[in-house]
């Protein structure tokens, strides 16, 4: 085992020298089993003053008579001269380095025994909390770190006539919107471009960024124009025809899809607008389909038609979709939500197109067709995330199967570490009513408990009467549900007081055979899992510095108890992370010196009230895309946040 100096690459055996710098011990571990890893050679920085000095269980591991000095209080850090503030143009953090921390004298520590104590502390993480909600290990009891004040589940809002103004968009964002959805089934490019510009303006003037998701219209089968609405009565028969010009007279209604005849068969159910009307197919000819009304209602012009259990044999991406996708590239959206995905081939086709365009835009698959369910595993492997589009999914499958598929889709995304959105009818009653139904509140809570990254509002914010209150209700329910989950650390059976682990969070490579080769991606997954373990053990937030957003995405997958604050100098990465559970992404200009950047980031979080003096924070750096190191090393430090400098009064200045 070797120790590595924090300021050089020199390595010296432990037996000959121990390097302790500025209250931190920096150790490189190889064949020892630390954090549950074997042969995982990565740098881990442990702040002995903050981590070991206040850990009762870890102090007990130090042998009697060993020397250990309490940490000295660091000098306060000078606050940045410029800071982004609400309603003011965004300003980059100062380029000049801040005043460095005063060097603390080295203190003698016995490393081997400290590591043994640390390993013992980490092993306590797997002990489930008791009925009082507390675990046996509480390293930060003296300084509360309230992760419950943050909502980790993100909110996607559909933009429409009631919310597409500057005041409407900004108020949605202030109420809790994380992602703005542009529904390309409505509006034109000019109106959507105006929304994009307003959101970009908001992002420049405020503390957080709102991502933009473009939702394609997709292939749709629709009825033609009618001279007037038709009151369809149960038992009546109507003809749906591919002949143009059938306007409802004499019971004949046109369909805009020539393959409609081939896709249907006698006995199939034809649904109008997802089931508002239902008809049974009785007979068909080369041009006509005869149907009998099962569930009656009012038939209007240009209604959406689908056959239960079947997908229309249409191109997955239509000409209109390609035009909208090109528009998304031009304005710089952050995500595409691809409608009516049938298989993985269309996902790869879109990704090839984006690669040629040089566009780094995430691709989400809307799981809403019978074919997408049949090919679910391949689709989830191909995409960057998914949306459970329950409206059309419930039209193509029996409605009682929708909750089961929702659970399966969410679990599939969680297993792969990809974000997933639960959508459709989350607060449908609030389109017209100021309060939700109890069933809708439970629907949101279930989506949060299942592990979804985000929940989505559609008509509630696009054309509803209470768009802002809908966001507030969704945010409140999600936060309360998260706090309840945090209190017992996992899922719990109804009527049981015993907590159970969340079954989709498992250690990476837990089933790997000894000596099996592990890729760099696998090492990153292992590091993220054990960084989460450490942060949960010491009850600290995670502070991540990332260029591409890969490490915060991995950390989000393992669902740490406390927030993931990610600093990046790439604005697109900042926006894309807005969809990930528990991640708060902030902009910072990386300094040549890592310590200066750390100080700036901690000060920024203190200024915003996210961190307080005396709290612990775990600082994470990814080794796959290092910022300050030429060598590829994953690194984590646990530090105690210094007290914020007190403002100087005018009398003191005099």
Image (cartoon, rainbow, N blue to C red):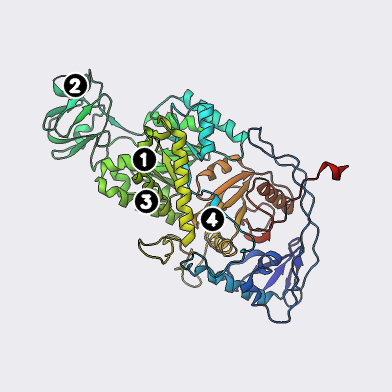
Question: Can the viewer see residue 579?
Answer: yes
Pick whichever of labels 1 and 2 is earlier in the sequence: 2
Above or below, 537 relative to 389: below
Pick whichever of labels 3 and 1 is earlier in the sequence: 3
Distance (Cα) linking label 4 and label 2: 56 Å
Residue wearing tag 4: 555
In the image, which disc is placed on residue 248? Answer: 2
In the picture, which quadrant includes the C terminus? top right
> Residue 135 at x, y = what percent?
52, 67
Q: Nearer the viewer, mark 3 or mark 1?
A: 1
Residue wearing tag 3: 409
Label 1: which secondary element: loop
Distance (Cα) linking label 1 and label 2: 30 Å
Label 2: which secondary element: loop
Q: Which residue, as the protein is rendered here, is positioned at the far bottom?
A: 64
> Residue 414 at x, y = what percent?
43, 54
96 left or right of 569 in image: right
Above or below, 562 relative to 386: below
């Amino acid at each position: 085992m070797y120790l590595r100096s924090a300021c050089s690459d020199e390595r010296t055996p432990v037996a000959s020298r121990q390097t302790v710098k500025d209250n931190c011990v920096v150790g490189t571990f190889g064949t020892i089993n630390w954090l549950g890893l074997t042969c995982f050679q990565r740098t881990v920085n442990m702040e002995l003053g903050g981590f070991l000095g206040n850990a009762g269980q870890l102090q007990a591991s130090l042998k009697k008579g060993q020397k250990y000095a309490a940490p000295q209080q660091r000098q306060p850090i000078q606050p940045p001269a410029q800071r982004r503030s609400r309603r003011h143009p965004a300003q980059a953090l100062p380029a000049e380095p801040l005043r460095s921390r005063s060097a603390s004298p080295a203190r003698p520590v016995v490393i081997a025994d400290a590591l043994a104590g640390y390993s013992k502390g980490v092993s306590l993480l797997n002990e489930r909390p008791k009925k009082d909600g507390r675990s046996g290990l509480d390293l930060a009891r003296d300084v509360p770190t309230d992760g419950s004040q943050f909502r980790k589940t993100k909110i996607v809002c559909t933009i429409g006539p009631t919310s597409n103004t500057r005041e409407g968009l900004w108020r949605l964002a202030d109420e809790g919107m994380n992602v703005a959805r542009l529904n390309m089934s409505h509006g034109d490019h000019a109106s959507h471009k105006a929304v994009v510009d307003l959101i970009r303006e908001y992002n420049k003037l405020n503390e957080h960024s709102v991502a933009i998701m473009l939702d394609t219209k997709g292939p749709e089968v629709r009825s033609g124009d009618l001279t007037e609405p038709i009151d369809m009565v149960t038992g009546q028969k109507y003809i749906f025809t591919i002949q143009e010009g059938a306007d409802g007279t004499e019971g004949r209604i046109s369909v805009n899809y020539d393959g409609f005849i081939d896709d249907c068969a006698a006995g199939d159910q034809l649904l109008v607008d997802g089931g508002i009307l239902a008809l049974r197919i009785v007979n068909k000819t080369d041009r006509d389909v005869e149907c009998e009304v099962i569930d009656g209602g009012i038939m209007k012009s240009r209604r959406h038609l689908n056959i239960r259990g079947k997908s229309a044999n249409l191109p997955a991406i239509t000409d209109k979709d390609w035009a909208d996708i090109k528009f998304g590239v031009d304005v710089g959206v952050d995500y595409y939500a691809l409608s009516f995905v049938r298989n993985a081939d269309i996902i790869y086709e879109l990704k090839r197109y984006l690669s040629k365009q040089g566009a780094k835009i995430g691709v989400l698959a809307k799981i809403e067709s019978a074919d997408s369910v049949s090919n679910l595993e391949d689709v989830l492997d191909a995409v960057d995330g998914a949306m459970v589009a329950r409206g059309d999914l419930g039209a193509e499958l029996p409605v009682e199967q929708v909750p089961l598929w929702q659970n399966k889709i969410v679990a599939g995304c969680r297993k792969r570490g990809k974000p997933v959105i639960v959508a459709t009818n989350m607060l449908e009653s609030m389109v017209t009513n100021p309060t939700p139904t109890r069933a809708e509140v439970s629907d949101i809570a279930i989506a949060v408990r299942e592990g979804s990254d985000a929940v989505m509002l559609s008509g509630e914010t696009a054309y509803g009467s209470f768009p802002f209150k809908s966001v507030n209700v969704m945010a409140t329910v999600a936060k309360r549900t998260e706090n309840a989950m945090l209190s017992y650390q996992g899922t719990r059976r109804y009527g049981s007081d015993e907590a159970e682990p969340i079954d989709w969070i498992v250690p990476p490579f837990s089933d790997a055979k000894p000596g099996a080769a592990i890729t760099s991606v696998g090492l990153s997954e292992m590091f993220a899992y054990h960084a989460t373990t450490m942060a949960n053990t010491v009850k600290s937030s995670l502070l991540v510095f990332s260029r591409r957003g890969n490490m915060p995405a991995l950390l989000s997958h393992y669902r740490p108890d406390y927030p993931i604050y990610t600093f990046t100098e790439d604005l697109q990465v900042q926006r894309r992370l807005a969809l990930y559970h528990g991640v708060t992404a902030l902009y910072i200009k990386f300094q040549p010196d890592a310590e200066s950047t750390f100080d700036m980031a901690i000060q920024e979080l203190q200024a915003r009230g996210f961190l307080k003096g005396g709290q612990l924070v775990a600082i994470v750096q990814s080794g796959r895309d290092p910022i300050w190191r030429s060598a590829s090393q994953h690194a984590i430090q646990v530090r105690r946040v210094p007290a914020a400098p007190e403002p100087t009064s005018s009398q003191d200045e005099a």
